[in-house]
Protein backbone atom coordinates (compact mmCIF):
# COMPACT_ATOMS: atom_id res chain seq x y z
CA UNK A 1 0.00 0.00 0.00
CA UNK A 2 1.31 3.45 -0.86
CA UNK A 3 1.73 6.10 1.82
CA UNK A 4 2.08 9.74 0.82
CA UNK A 5 4.02 10.44 3.96
CA UNK A 6 5.62 8.35 6.68
CA UNK A 7 6.66 9.96 9.96
CA UNK A 8 9.30 7.67 11.38
CA UNK A 9 11.39 7.26 14.49
CA UNK A 10 9.32 9.47 16.77
CA UNK A 11 7.62 8.98 20.10
CA UNK A 12 3.86 9.13 19.64
CA UNK A 13 1.77 10.75 22.36
CA UNK A 14 -2.00 10.23 22.53
CA UNK A 15 -4.55 11.22 25.16
CA UNK A 16 -3.68 8.04 27.04
CA UNK A 17 -0.30 6.61 25.90
CA UNK A 18 3.31 7.43 25.05
CA UNK A 19 4.97 4.90 22.68
CA UNK A 20 7.53 4.51 19.90
CA UNK A 21 5.81 4.22 16.51
CA UNK A 22 5.89 5.24 12.87
CA UNK A 23 2.82 6.78 11.22
CA UNK A 24 1.71 6.15 7.64
CA UNK A 25 -0.46 8.79 5.96
CA UNK A 26 -2.67 8.19 2.91
CA UNK A 27 -5.30 10.54 1.43
CA UNK A 28 -4.67 13.03 4.22
CA UNK A 29 -5.64 10.53 6.88
CA UNK A 30 -3.69 8.43 9.31
CA UNK A 31 -3.67 5.01 7.64
CA UNK A 32 -1.28 3.07 9.86
CA UNK A 33 0.42 3.31 13.23
CA UNK A 34 3.06 0.60 13.66
CA UNK A 35 6.51 -0.05 15.11
CA UNK A 36 8.15 0.29 11.70
CA UNK A 37 6.64 1.46 8.42
CA UNK A 38 8.64 1.26 5.21
CA UNK A 39 8.09 3.35 2.07
CA UNK A 40 6.25 6.62 1.72
CA UNK A 41 6.77 9.23 -1.01
CA UNK A 42 7.95 11.61 1.72
CA UNK A 43 9.67 10.42 4.88
CA UNK A 44 9.82 12.74 7.88
CA UNK A 45 12.47 11.85 10.45
CA UNK A 46 11.06 12.38 13.94
CA UNK A 47 13.82 10.71 15.95
CA UNK A 48 14.15 12.33 19.33
CA UNK A 49 10.87 14.17 18.76
CA UNK A 50 7.32 13.87 20.10
CA UNK A 51 4.56 13.19 17.58
CA UNK A 52 1.23 14.49 18.86
CA UNK A 53 -2.22 15.39 17.57
CA UNK A 54 -2.11 18.94 16.17
CA UNK A 55 -3.46 21.47 18.62
CA UNK A 56 -7.09 22.56 18.41
CA UNK A 57 -7.64 26.13 19.58
CA UNK A 58 -11.27 26.35 20.65
CA UNK A 59 -11.21 29.91 22.00
CA UNK A 60 -9.86 32.68 19.80
CA UNK A 61 -11.14 35.88 18.24
CA UNK A 62 -10.23 36.20 14.57
CA UNK A 63 -11.51 38.83 12.11
CA UNK A 64 -14.07 39.78 14.74
CA UNK A 65 -15.27 43.27 15.66
CA UNK A 66 -15.71 43.96 19.34
CA UNK A 67 -19.15 45.24 20.33
CA UNK A 68 -17.64 48.74 20.11
CA UNK A 69 -16.58 47.97 16.50
CA UNK A 70 -12.82 47.54 16.92
CA UNK A 71 -11.56 44.87 14.49
CA UNK A 72 -9.06 42.32 15.73
CA UNK A 73 -5.57 42.69 14.22
CA UNK A 74 -5.59 39.06 13.07
CA UNK A 75 -7.71 37.75 10.22
CA UNK A 76 -8.08 34.12 9.09
CA UNK A 77 -4.76 34.33 7.27
CA UNK A 78 -2.49 35.74 9.99
CA UNK A 79 -4.49 34.07 12.76
CA UNK A 80 -4.23 30.62 11.23
CA UNK A 81 -0.55 31.10 10.39
CA UNK A 82 0.22 32.11 13.97
CA UNK A 83 -1.81 29.13 15.21
CA UNK A 84 0.10 26.76 12.91
CA UNK A 85 3.53 28.05 14.01
CA UNK A 86 2.32 27.42 17.55
CA UNK A 87 1.52 23.75 16.88
CA UNK A 88 -2.13 23.89 15.84
CA UNK A 89 -3.78 22.19 12.92
CA UNK A 90 -7.32 23.37 13.63
CA UNK A 91 -8.98 26.39 15.23
CA UNK A 92 -12.51 27.41 16.10
CA UNK A 93 -12.89 31.22 16.23
CA UNK A 94 -16.15 32.99 17.04
CA UNK A 95 -18.73 34.25 14.55
CA UNK A 96 -20.36 37.11 16.40
CA UNK A 97 -23.91 38.34 15.92
CA UNK A 98 -24.61 42.05 16.25
CA UNK A 99 -28.02 42.82 17.66
CA UNK A 100 -30.66 42.65 14.96
CA UNK A 101 -28.47 40.60 12.59
CA UNK A 102 -29.80 37.30 11.23
CA UNK A 103 -27.81 34.13 11.87
CA UNK A 104 -27.60 33.42 8.13
CA UNK A 105 -26.01 36.83 7.71
CA UNK A 106 -23.53 36.20 10.55
CA UNK A 107 -22.41 32.92 9.02
CA UNK A 108 -22.14 34.39 5.52
CA UNK A 109 -20.02 37.24 6.90
CA UNK A 110 -17.54 34.89 8.57
CA UNK A 111 -17.51 32.49 5.61
CA UNK A 112 -16.36 35.35 3.44
CA UNK A 113 -13.70 36.34 5.99
CA UNK A 114 -12.38 32.79 6.24
CA UNK A 115 -12.55 31.68 2.62
CA UNK A 116 -9.25 31.66 0.79
CA UNK A 117 -7.32 32.63 3.91
CA UNK A 118 -6.88 29.87 6.45
CA UNK A 119 -3.86 27.55 6.33
CA UNK A 120 -5.46 25.09 8.78
CA UNK A 121 -9.00 23.77 9.16
CA UNK A 122 -11.55 25.83 11.03
CA UNK A 123 -15.08 25.97 12.34
CA UNK A 124 -17.00 28.66 14.23
CA UNK A 125 -18.74 29.02 17.54
CA UNK A 126 -21.61 31.51 17.15
CA UNK A 127 -21.86 34.39 19.61
CA UNK A 128 -25.51 35.25 20.23
CA UNK A 129 -26.27 38.76 21.46
CA UNK A 130 -29.91 38.89 20.34
CA UNK A 131 -31.96 35.72 20.94
CA UNK A 132 -35.07 36.86 19.04
CA UNK A 133 -37.81 34.34 18.15
CA UNK A 134 -36.46 34.33 14.57
CA UNK A 135 -32.95 33.50 15.83
CA UNK A 136 -34.21 30.78 18.18
CA UNK A 137 -36.67 29.16 15.79
CA UNK A 138 -34.98 29.55 12.41
CA UNK A 139 -31.42 30.83 12.70
CA UNK A 140 -29.98 28.45 15.24
CA UNK A 141 -31.53 25.24 13.85
CA UNK A 142 -30.08 26.19 10.43
CA UNK A 143 -26.66 26.80 11.98
CA UNK A 144 -26.80 23.37 13.62
CA UNK A 145 -27.74 21.78 10.31
CA UNK A 146 -24.55 23.32 8.86
CA UNK A 147 -22.45 21.77 11.59
CA UNK A 148 -22.09 24.77 13.88
CA UNK A 149 -22.90 23.04 17.14
CA UNK A 150 -21.76 25.48 19.81
CA UNK A 151 -22.22 29.11 20.67
CA UNK A 152 -21.29 31.61 23.29
CA UNK A 153 -23.38 34.01 25.31
CA UNK A 154 -22.31 36.84 27.62
CA UNK A 155 -23.50 37.65 31.13
CA UNK A 156 -21.58 40.94 31.05
CA UNK A 157 -21.23 44.00 28.72
CA UNK A 158 -24.40 46.03 28.07
CA UNK A 159 -24.27 45.39 24.32
CA UNK A 160 -23.82 41.61 24.67
CA UNK A 161 -25.48 40.44 27.87
CA UNK A 162 -28.73 38.61 27.09
CA UNK A 163 -30.09 38.18 30.60
CA UNK A 164 -31.03 35.00 32.46
CA UNK A 165 -34.21 34.48 30.41
CA UNK A 166 -32.30 34.76 27.15
CA UNK A 167 -29.82 32.21 28.43
CA UNK A 168 -32.59 29.76 29.32
CA UNK A 169 -34.08 30.14 25.83
CA UNK A 170 -30.72 29.62 24.11
CA UNK A 171 -29.75 26.66 26.27
CA UNK A 172 -33.11 25.02 25.56
CA UNK A 173 -32.72 25.35 21.79
CA UNK A 174 -29.11 24.20 22.02
CA UNK A 175 -30.12 21.12 23.96
CA UNK A 176 -32.84 20.24 21.46
CA UNK A 177 -30.28 20.41 18.65
CA UNK A 178 -27.46 18.59 20.40
CA UNK A 179 -25.40 21.76 20.73
CA UNK A 180 -23.49 23.22 23.66
CA UNK A 181 -23.72 26.72 25.10
CA UNK A 182 -20.53 28.53 26.11
CA UNK A 183 -20.70 31.34 28.60
CA UNK A 184 -18.60 34.35 29.59
CA UNK A 185 -19.57 34.52 33.26
CA UNK A 186 -19.12 37.85 35.05
CA UNK A 187 -21.87 39.71 36.92
CA UNK A 188 -22.60 42.80 34.80
CA UNK A 189 -24.06 44.94 37.58
CA UNK A 190 -21.19 44.26 39.98
CA UNK A 191 -18.72 45.39 37.31
CA UNK A 192 -20.79 48.46 36.45
CA UNK A 193 -21.04 49.40 40.11
CA UNK A 194 -17.26 49.09 40.49
CA UNK A 195 -16.78 51.16 37.30
CA UNK A 196 -18.98 53.96 38.63
CA UNK A 197 -17.11 54.08 41.96
CA UNK A 198 -13.70 54.03 40.27
CA UNK A 199 -14.73 56.72 37.75
CA UNK A 200 -16.08 58.95 40.53
CA UNK A 201 -12.74 58.62 42.34
CA UNK A 202 -10.82 59.41 39.13
CA UNK A 203 -9.19 55.97 39.07
CA UNK A 204 -9.12 55.13 35.38
CA UNK A 205 -5.58 53.88 34.64
CA UNK A 206 -5.21 50.34 33.22
CA UNK A 207 -4.46 48.85 36.65
CA UNK A 208 -8.01 49.65 37.78
CA UNK A 209 -9.39 47.40 35.07
CA UNK A 210 -8.36 44.41 37.18
CA UNK A 211 -9.91 45.97 40.30
CA UNK A 212 -13.18 46.67 38.45
CA UNK A 213 -13.89 43.00 37.76
CA UNK A 214 -13.82 41.25 41.15
CA UNK A 215 -13.37 37.50 41.55
CA UNK A 216 -16.80 37.51 43.21
CA UNK A 217 -18.37 38.74 39.97
CA UNK A 218 -17.06 35.62 38.23
CA UNK A 219 -17.97 33.26 41.04
CA UNK A 220 -21.54 34.60 41.22
CA UNK A 221 -22.06 34.44 37.47
CA UNK A 222 -20.64 30.92 37.11
CA UNK A 223 -22.96 29.77 39.91
CA UNK A 224 -25.93 31.40 38.20
CA UNK A 225 -25.05 30.06 34.75
CA UNK A 226 -24.75 26.54 36.17
CA UNK A 227 -28.13 26.87 37.94
CA UNK A 228 -29.74 28.00 34.68
CA UNK A 229 -28.18 25.08 32.81
CA UNK A 230 -29.38 22.66 35.49
CA UNK A 231 -32.97 23.94 35.28
CA UNK A 232 -33.11 22.92 31.62
CA UNK A 233 -30.55 20.09 31.97
CA UNK A 234 -28.53 21.47 29.07
CA UNK A 235 -24.76 21.20 28.55
CA UNK A 236 -22.67 24.25 29.44
CA UNK A 237 -19.05 25.22 28.78
CA UNK A 238 -17.70 27.98 31.04
CA UNK A 239 -15.01 29.85 29.11
CA UNK A 240 -11.86 31.47 30.53
CA UNK A 241 -12.32 30.57 34.20
CA UNK A 242 -9.95 32.87 36.12
CA UNK A 243 -10.70 32.21 39.79
CA UNK A 244 -10.16 29.43 42.33
CA UNK A 245 -13.74 29.92 43.57
CA UNK A 246 -15.17 29.52 40.08
CA UNK A 247 -13.07 26.44 39.39
CA UNK A 248 -14.05 24.81 42.68
CA UNK A 249 -17.72 25.42 41.94
CA UNK A 250 -17.30 23.84 38.50
CA UNK A 251 -15.45 20.86 39.98
CA UNK A 252 -18.22 20.28 42.55
CA UNK A 253 -21.01 20.39 39.94
CA UNK A 254 -19.07 18.07 37.62
CA UNK A 255 -18.76 15.61 40.49
CA UNK A 256 -22.54 15.74 40.79
CA UNK A 257 -22.89 14.71 37.14
CA UNK A 258 -23.92 18.08 35.72
CA UNK A 259 -23.20 18.42 31.97
CA UNK A 260 -20.54 21.00 32.57
CA UNK A 261 -17.14 21.73 31.00
CA UNK A 262 -14.66 24.53 31.43
CA UNK A 263 -11.31 25.93 30.38
CA UNK A 264 -8.73 28.30 31.74
CA UNK A 265 -6.08 30.23 29.79
CA UNK A 266 -2.29 30.64 29.97
CA UNK A 267 -2.62 34.27 31.08
CA UNK A 268 -4.42 33.26 34.29
CA UNK A 269 -1.65 30.75 35.05
CA UNK A 270 1.27 32.94 33.91
CA UNK A 271 0.48 36.54 34.86
CA UNK A 272 -0.68 38.48 37.89
CA UNK A 273 -2.37 41.84 38.19
CA UNK A 274 1.02 43.46 38.94
CA UNK A 275 1.55 43.28 35.16
CA UNK A 276 -1.05 46.05 34.84
CA UNK A 277 1.05 48.34 37.07
CA UNK A 278 3.71 48.85 34.42
CA UNK A 279 4.54 52.52 33.80
CA UNK A 280 2.44 54.75 31.57
CA UNK A 281 -0.17 52.90 29.54
CA UNK A 282 1.97 49.75 29.25
CA UNK A 283 -0.44 47.96 31.58
CA UNK A 284 -3.06 48.05 28.81
CA UNK A 285 -1.16 45.20 27.13
CA UNK A 286 -2.27 42.93 29.96
CA UNK A 287 -5.91 43.98 30.15
CA UNK A 288 -8.33 41.16 29.51
CA UNK A 289 -11.71 40.15 30.88
CA UNK A 290 -11.89 38.45 33.25
CA UNK A 291 -8.65 39.98 34.50
CA UNK A 292 -5.48 38.20 35.56
CA UNK A 293 -5.41 37.72 39.36
CA UNK A 294 -2.68 36.74 41.85
CA UNK A 295 -0.13 33.99 42.51
CA UNK A 296 -2.38 32.06 44.93
CA UNK A 297 -4.98 31.90 42.15
CA UNK A 298 -2.35 30.63 39.72
CA UNK A 299 -1.46 27.78 42.06
CA UNK A 300 -5.11 26.85 42.59
CA UNK A 301 -5.85 26.94 38.85
CA UNK A 302 -2.84 24.69 38.15
CA UNK A 303 -4.29 22.14 40.63
CA UNK A 304 -7.54 22.25 38.67
CA UNK A 305 -5.68 21.82 35.37
CA UNK A 306 -3.79 18.82 36.73
CA UNK A 307 -6.81 17.18 38.35
CA UNK A 308 -9.22 17.43 35.44
CA UNK A 309 -11.58 20.31 36.26
CA UNK A 310 -10.63 21.96 32.95
CA UNK A 311 -11.07 20.30 29.58
CA UNK A 312 -8.66 22.68 27.90
CA UNK A 313 -6.22 25.51 28.33
CA UNK A 314 -7.21 27.94 25.56
CA UNK A 315 -5.53 31.14 24.44
CA UNK A 316 -8.55 33.47 24.23
CA UNK A 317 -6.45 35.17 21.54
CA UNK A 318 -8.05 38.63 21.31
CA UNK A 319 -5.50 40.63 19.31
CA UNK A 320 -5.77 44.39 19.76
CA UNK A 321 -2.55 46.16 18.90
CA UNK A 322 -0.85 48.62 21.25
CA UNK A 323 -1.76 51.47 18.89
CA UNK A 324 -4.69 53.48 17.54
CA UNK A 325 -6.13 50.49 15.65
CA UNK A 326 -6.48 48.53 18.90
CA UNK A 327 -5.94 49.42 22.53
CA UNK A 328 -5.90 53.16 21.83
CA UNK A 329 -8.78 53.44 19.34
CA UNK A 330 -10.28 55.89 21.86
CA UNK A 331 -7.05 57.84 22.42
CA UNK A 332 -3.70 57.17 24.04
CA UNK A 333 -4.94 58.39 27.43
CA UNK A 334 -8.28 56.58 27.31
CA UNK A 335 -9.74 55.49 30.66
CA UNK A 336 -9.68 51.70 31.10
CA UNK A 337 -13.40 51.19 30.24
CA UNK A 338 -12.62 52.58 26.76
CA UNK A 339 -9.60 50.35 26.10
CA UNK A 340 -10.19 47.13 24.13
CA UNK A 341 -10.05 44.07 26.32
CA UNK A 342 -8.01 41.05 25.47
CA UNK A 343 -4.51 39.85 24.73
CA UNK A 344 -2.90 37.81 21.98
CA UNK A 345 -1.61 34.30 22.61
CA UNK A 346 -2.61 31.79 19.93
CA UNK A 347 1.04 31.26 18.95
CA UNK A 348 2.25 30.86 22.55
CA UNK A 349 -0.58 28.78 24.00
CA UNK A 350 0.98 25.40 23.33
CA UNK A 351 4.71 26.15 23.76
CA UNK A 352 3.86 27.89 27.03
CA UNK A 353 1.64 25.00 28.24
CA UNK A 354 4.26 22.46 27.23
CA UNK A 355 7.04 24.38 28.95
CA UNK A 356 5.26 25.27 32.18
CA UNK A 357 3.13 22.12 32.25
CA UNK A 358 5.09 19.18 30.83
CA UNK A 359 8.70 20.40 31.12
CA UNK A 360 8.15 21.53 34.72
CA UNK A 361 6.37 18.31 35.68
CA UNK A 362 2.93 19.77 36.44
CA UNK A 363 1.09 17.64 33.86
CA UNK A 364 1.83 14.45 31.92
CA UNK A 365 2.32 14.25 28.17
CA UNK A 366 -1.10 12.58 27.66
CA UNK A 367 -2.65 15.40 29.71
CA UNK A 368 -0.97 17.88 27.39
CA UNK A 369 -2.68 16.14 24.45
CA UNK A 370 -6.03 16.19 26.24
CA UNK A 371 -5.76 19.89 27.14
CA UNK A 372 -4.38 20.99 23.78
CA UNK A 373 -6.44 18.91 21.37
CA UNK A 374 -8.40 15.78 22.14
CA UNK A 375 -10.87 17.13 24.70
CA UNK A 376 -11.82 20.03 22.44
CA UNK A 377 -12.33 17.57 19.56
CA UNK A 378 -14.72 15.42 21.60
CA UNK A 379 -16.64 18.25 23.26
CA UNK A 380 -17.04 20.33 20.10
CA UNK A 381 -17.74 17.43 17.76
CA UNK A 382 -14.62 17.52 15.55
CA UNK A 383 -14.94 13.82 15.04
CA UNK A 384 -11.95 13.18 12.76
CA UNK A 385 -9.53 15.28 14.77
CA UNK A 386 -7.66 15.22 18.07
CA UNK A 387 -6.25 11.70 17.94
CA UNK A 388 -3.45 9.66 16.42
CA UNK A 389 -5.27 6.57 15.24
CA UNK A 390 -6.19 5.05 11.87
CA UNK A 391 -9.01 6.92 10.12
CA UNK A 392 -8.37 10.26 11.78
CA UNK A 393 -7.20 13.31 9.83
CA UNK A 394 -3.41 13.46 9.67
CA UNK A 395 -3.40 16.63 11.80
CA UNK A 396 -0.09 16.15 13.54
CA UNK A 397 2.45 18.30 15.37
CA UNK A 398 6.04 17.13 15.77
CA UNK A 399 7.67 18.70 18.83
CA UNK A 400 11.26 19.04 19.97
CA UNK A 401 10.83 18.68 23.73
CA UNK A 402 14.38 19.89 24.46
CA UNK A 403 14.58 23.05 22.39
CA UNK A 404 14.88 26.04 24.70
CA UNK A 405 14.48 29.63 23.60
CA UNK A 406 12.97 32.88 24.73
CA UNK A 407 9.54 33.90 23.48
CA UNK A 408 9.68 36.82 21.04
CA UNK A 409 7.12 38.75 19.03
CA UNK A 410 8.76 37.63 15.75
CA UNK A 411 8.09 33.99 16.63
CA UNK A 412 4.35 34.64 16.89
CA UNK A 413 3.85 35.27 13.13
CA UNK A 414 0.70 37.22 13.95
CA UNK A 415 -0.26 40.83 13.14
CA UNK A 416 0.41 42.04 16.65
CA UNK A 417 2.95 44.56 17.89
CA UNK A 418 3.52 42.89 21.26
CA UNK A 419 3.29 39.54 23.00
CA UNK A 420 2.50 39.34 26.72
CA UNK A 421 4.88 36.36 26.84
CA UNK A 422 7.92 38.38 25.63
CA UNK A 423 11.17 37.10 27.08
CA UNK A 424 9.74 34.05 28.84
CA UNK A 425 12.11 31.08 28.74
CA UNK A 426 10.29 28.23 26.94
CA UNK A 427 11.42 24.60 26.76
CA UNK A 428 9.66 22.56 24.09
CA UNK A 429 8.67 23.93 20.66
CA UNK A 430 6.71 22.50 17.72
CA UNK A 431 8.94 21.95 14.71
CA UNK A 432 6.69 20.52 12.03
CA UNK A 433 2.92 20.82 11.74
CA UNK A 434 0.76 18.81 9.34
CA UNK A 435 -2.83 19.47 8.43
CA UNK A 436 -4.63 16.60 6.67
CA UNK A 437 -1.22 15.20 5.78
CA UNK A 438 0.21 18.38 4.24
CA UNK A 439 3.16 20.11 5.89
CA UNK A 440 2.00 23.58 6.94
CA UNK A 441 5.01 24.64 9.00
CA UNK A 442 8.48 23.12 9.04
CA UNK A 443 11.50 24.41 11.00
CA UNK A 444 10.32 27.97 11.15
CA UNK A 445 9.02 28.27 7.58
CA UNK A 446 5.47 28.39 6.28
CA UNK A 447 4.96 25.68 3.66
CA UNK A 448 1.23 25.99 2.92
CA UNK A 449 -0.91 28.28 0.82
CA UNK A 450 -3.58 30.35 2.51
CA UNK A 451 -6.96 28.92 1.54
CA UNK A 452 -6.03 25.27 1.95
CA UNK A 453 -7.77 25.17 5.34
CA UNK A 454 -11.35 23.95 5.13
CA UNK A 455 -14.49 24.59 7.11
CA UNK A 456 -15.25 21.52 9.25
CA UNK A 457 -18.87 20.63 9.95
CA UNK A 458 -19.10 19.44 13.54
CA UNK A 459 -21.24 16.89 15.34
CA UNK A 460 -23.18 17.07 18.55
CA UNK A 461 -21.43 17.27 21.91
CA UNK A 462 -20.55 13.89 23.44
CA UNK A 463 -22.17 13.73 26.90
CA UNK A 464 -21.39 10.09 27.61
CA UNK A 465 -20.97 9.57 31.34
CA UNK A 466 -22.66 12.83 32.28
CA UNK A 467 -26.09 11.97 33.71
CA UNK A 468 -27.11 15.61 34.10
CA UNK A 469 -29.54 17.08 36.55
CA UNK A 470 -33.32 16.94 36.69
CA UNK A 471 -35.12 19.70 38.53
CA UNK A 472 -37.96 18.07 40.54
CA UNK A 473 -40.40 20.63 39.10
CA UNK A 474 -39.65 19.43 35.55
CA UNK A 475 -39.32 15.72 36.27
CA UNK A 476 -41.72 13.49 34.29
CA UNK A 477 -41.35 10.83 36.98
CA UNK A 478 -42.84 13.19 39.56
CA UNK A 479 -45.61 14.25 37.26
CA UNK A 480 -45.71 17.94 37.86
CA UNK A 481 -44.45 20.48 35.33
CA UNK A 482 -43.28 17.71 33.05
CA UNK A 483 -45.46 19.08 30.24
CA UNK A 484 -43.01 21.95 29.75
CA UNK A 485 -39.73 20.07 30.31
CA UNK A 486 -37.24 20.81 27.51
N1 LIG B 1 -14.10 37.77 26.45
C1 LIG B 1 -13.42 36.95 25.69
O1 LIG B 1 -13.76 35.78 25.66
N2 LIG B 1 -12.39 37.38 25.00
C2 LIG B 1 -11.96 38.71 24.97
C3 LIG B 1 -12.70 39.63 25.82
C4 LIG B 1 -13.82 39.04 26.56
O2 LIG B 1 -14.50 39.71 27.29
ZN1 LIG C 1 11.94 4.80 10.76
ZN1 LIG D 1 -15.26 36.26 27.25
ZN1 LIG E 1 -12.59 35.25 24.24
Image: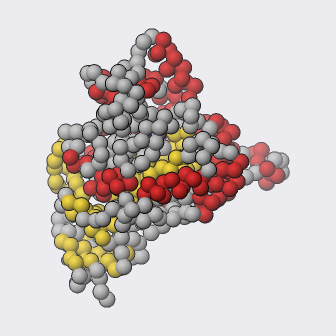
Query: Which residue: 42% across, 65% down?
Result: 454
**In the drawing, does residue 57 fall left or right of residue 481?**
left
x%, y% of residue 327?
A: 36, 32
Residue placed most toward the observer, 80 or 469: 80
**In the drawing, does residue 119 fall left or right of residue 240?**
left
| Colour logic | secondary structure
x%, y% of residue 32?
A: 33, 79
Looking at the rendered image, the quarter that the N terminus falls into is bottom left
- Is residue 13 positioned above or below 288 on the image? below
Q: Quadrant of residue 439?
A: bottom left
Q: Quadrant of residue 424?
A: top left
Q: Residue furthest bottom?
A: 1
**In the drawing, does residue 396 fall left or right of residue 43?**
right
Residue 354 visible, this orientation: no
- Is residue 315 positioned above or below 244 on the image? below
Residue placed most toward the observer, 350 or 114: 114
- Give the total of numbered labels: 0
- Is residue 249 positioned above or below 110 on the image? above
Query: Which residue: 19% across, 58% down?
Result: 444
x%, y% of residue 470?
A: 70, 49
Query: Which residue: 64% across, 54% down?
Result: 139
Query: Which residue: 20% across, 60% down?
Result: 445
Amino acid sequence: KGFETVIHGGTVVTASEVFRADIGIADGRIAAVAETIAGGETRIDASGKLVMPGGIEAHCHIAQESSSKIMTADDYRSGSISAAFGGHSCFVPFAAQHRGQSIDDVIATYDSRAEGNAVIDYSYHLIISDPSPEVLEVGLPRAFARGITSFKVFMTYDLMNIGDGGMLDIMTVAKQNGAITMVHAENNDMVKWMNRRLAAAGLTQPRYHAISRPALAEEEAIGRAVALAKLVDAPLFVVHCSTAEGATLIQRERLRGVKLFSETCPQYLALTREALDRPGMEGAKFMCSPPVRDSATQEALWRHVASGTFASVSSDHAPYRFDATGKFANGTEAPYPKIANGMPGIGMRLPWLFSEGVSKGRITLPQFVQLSSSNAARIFGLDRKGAIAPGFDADIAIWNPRETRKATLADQHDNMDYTPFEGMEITGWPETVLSRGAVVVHQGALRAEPGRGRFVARRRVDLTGMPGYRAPELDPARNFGAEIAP
